[in-house]
Structures are given as structure tokens and as C-alpha cells.
Image (cartoon, rainbow, N blue to C red):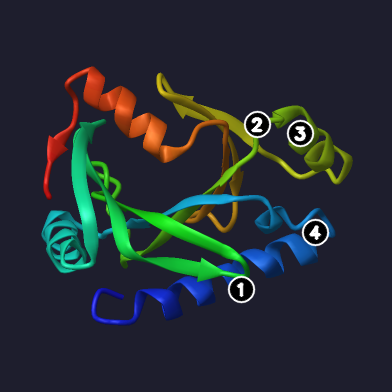
Amino acid sequence: MVDLNLQIEFEKYIKLLQEYFQERNIENFLESPIDHIAIKTKNSLDYQHFVNTFLTEAQNAQYIEMNDRRIATLKLIKPLKFKNQKIWYLEIMEPKPGKEPENNFFEHIEILRGNFESIEQSLKSKSIPYKSGGNEYHKTIVLNLNNLQEIKFTNTKIEEVIRKEKEDGKIKKLK
């Protein structure tokens, strides 16, 4: 994936998400603002390769160490595009120790939705399982797409999460 066009790979991923919503006959949540996408790498070496590769396409970048792994967040110079949306942020995730996947892939997308009740009602009405997630900086509702990939709904923009992590001294600047 590293050497391929990020926009093209993103469009393939979006198609997979659209099929997920269509097959389950639920609201196309991609009409809501997309906050960012995340790539999970298969090992630490690939994590570093992805970060180094995409740093050239970033305005700024930083990482945090969380759960024994690094998570880099890059603000892209040229945003990814979907319909009338521009997606400025890319997360690159090192795998948790002992949970290394076989390949590098888009692991999740985070969609901004302040009203979790409407999402939960929609999912419950179709008997679609979900779980609550997040951390001290934001809350999420998580749909398991295929045992590897997830769709996450968040109540906080990644810019705000980065600001809070920076205030807490957890951010390490890359660019």
C-alpha cells in the first residue's frame, strides 16, 4: 500500500464501507463528516516506512505512544477527497505487540457524529452489533467491519484530541 496512490486506495476502502452500509440496509453514515482514516501496519519496520513515506505529504506530523505502540497523526498537504468532503488527517498505527496483522491495511475510519443516540437506535433497529470505545480524549461507537477493519463514530475532531494530548505532554513532534 505504501507505494500506491493514497487517494486510489482510499476510494477502494470507501467502496467497501458503502457496501457494508448497503448490505445491512442502514443509513449511509459516510454522508456525515469524515474526520480521519487510519492505516494499521503489520510491524514496526513497516510503521516507520509508512511514516517516513507519508511525511513528505504532510504539513505537520506527531506521534503518541499508547498501549505499547506508536500512533502517528499526519495532517496532509493535499487532502483525500470523498464527494464534497476533504479528509486532512491520516493516522498510521503500529500494531500492538502480539497482535501483528499479516498485511498493512486501512484499519478504521472515524466519522464525526455528536449524537450517539441516533446511531445506536439505527444500529439496534437492524440488530447490528456495536461496542462503545474511545479513551480519555474522546468517545467512540465501533462497528466491526470484518474482524480486521472498523467504522468508528467519534464525538471529537482529531485536531482536538491532538491538542489535549499535547497539553498533557504526550505528543512527540515528527514534522
Q: Position of residue 86 (x, y in %)?
A: 50, 61
Location of mark 1 (residue): 15
**Between tags 4 and 1, which lies in front?**
1
**Between tags 2 and 4, which lies in front?**
2
Residue at the spot 31% in from the left edge and 67% down from the top edge: 103
Would you say the residues marked 2 and 4 are in contact, meaning their CB atoms lie under 8 Å apart?
no
Considering only order in the chain, which callout, 2 or 3, is on the residue closer to the N terminus?
2
Q: How many residues crowd around disc 1 within 10 Å: few (fewer than 14), some, or many (20 or more)? A: few
Please, what secondary structure does the residue beneath circle 1 have?
helix
Location of mark 4 (residue): 24
Residue at the spot 40% in from the left edge and 56% down from the top edge: 88
Q: Position of residue 13 (x, y in %)?
A: 52, 70
> Which numbered dot is residue 114?
2
Amino acid type, label 4? Arg
> Which numbered dot is residue 167?
none
**Between tags 1 and 2, which lies in front?**
2
> Which numbered dot is residue 120?
3
Left or right of 18? Residue 107 is left
- Per the model, the C-alpha gap separating discs 3 and 1 is 23 Å
Would you place residue 156 above or below residue 52 in this image?
above
Please, what secondary structure does the residue beneath circle 4 have?
loop
Considering only order in the chain, which callout, 4 or 2, is on the residue closer to the N terminus?
4
Residue nearer the viewer, 122 or 174: 174
